[in-house]
Image (cartoon, rainbow, N blue to C red):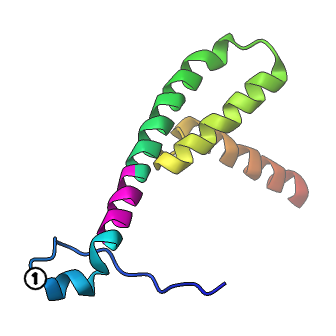
């Protein structure tokens, strides 16, 4: 299958027919608008589910359910660009340093 070349998203709306042709026509503009809308909808949905999962993780009793919930939370935070809590990062660093000190003895 031949892949068609991608047309860059315009910085502003075309004002002349020439500019409209250069950006790929109305269909190209519609595809860019649909991609932007899909990205915004996915972000809203991720934020919604992150809030729900963070509220309910402490209520889960089954180990596997808590593990799966924690995995989902980390994945959603990563996709939303939310950094992990500093306490978690520091704890992981301490574990790695402790493992290295044990190896070096």
Determine whether, in the image, residue 14 is placed left or right of residue 66: left
Q: Residue at x 67, y 48 (%)?
A: 93
Position of residue 84 relative to residue 3, above or below, is above
Q: Is residue 34 magenta?
A: yes
Q: Residue at x 61, y 16 (%)?
A: 56
Instruction: Tell me where residue 31 sits by quadrant.
Output: bottom left
Position of residue 46 relative to residue 14, above or below, is above
Dot 1 falls on a residue whose secondary structure is loop
Q: Residue at x 87, y 51 (%)?
A: 102
**Image quarter hosting the C terminus:** bottom right
Neighbours of disc 1 within 10 Å: few (<14), some (14-19), many (20+): few
Position of residue 39 relative to residue 16, above or below, is above
Name the spot of residue 65 as percent of width and height, x first. Answer: 77, 23
Q: Residue at x 72, y 14 (%)?
A: 60
**Range covered by the magenta-colored residues:** 29-37
Task: Return the residue found at the far left.
Answer: 15
Name the spot of residue 101 as percent of width and height, x first. Answer: 81, 53
Residue annotated with mark 1: 16
Name the spot of residue 6 as percent of width and height, x first. Answer: 44, 81
Q: How many discs appear? A: 1
**Residue 105 visible in the picture:** no
Front-lying residue, 76 or 43: 43
Name the spot of residue 25 as percent of width and height, x first. Answer: 28, 77
């Amino acid at each position: 299958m031949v892949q068609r070349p991608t047309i860059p998203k315009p910085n502003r709306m075309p004002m002349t027919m020439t500019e409209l042709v250069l950006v790929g026509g109305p269909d190209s503009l519609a595809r860019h608008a649909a991609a932007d809308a899909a990205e915004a909808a996915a972000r809203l949905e991720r934020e919604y589910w992150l809030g729900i999962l963070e509220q309910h993780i402490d209520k889960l009793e089954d180990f596997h359910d808590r593990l799966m919930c924690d995995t989902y939370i980390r994945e959603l935070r990563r996709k939303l660009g939310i950094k992990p809590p500093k306490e978690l990062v520091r704890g992981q660093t301490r574990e790695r340093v402790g493992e290295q000190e044990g190896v070096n003895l």
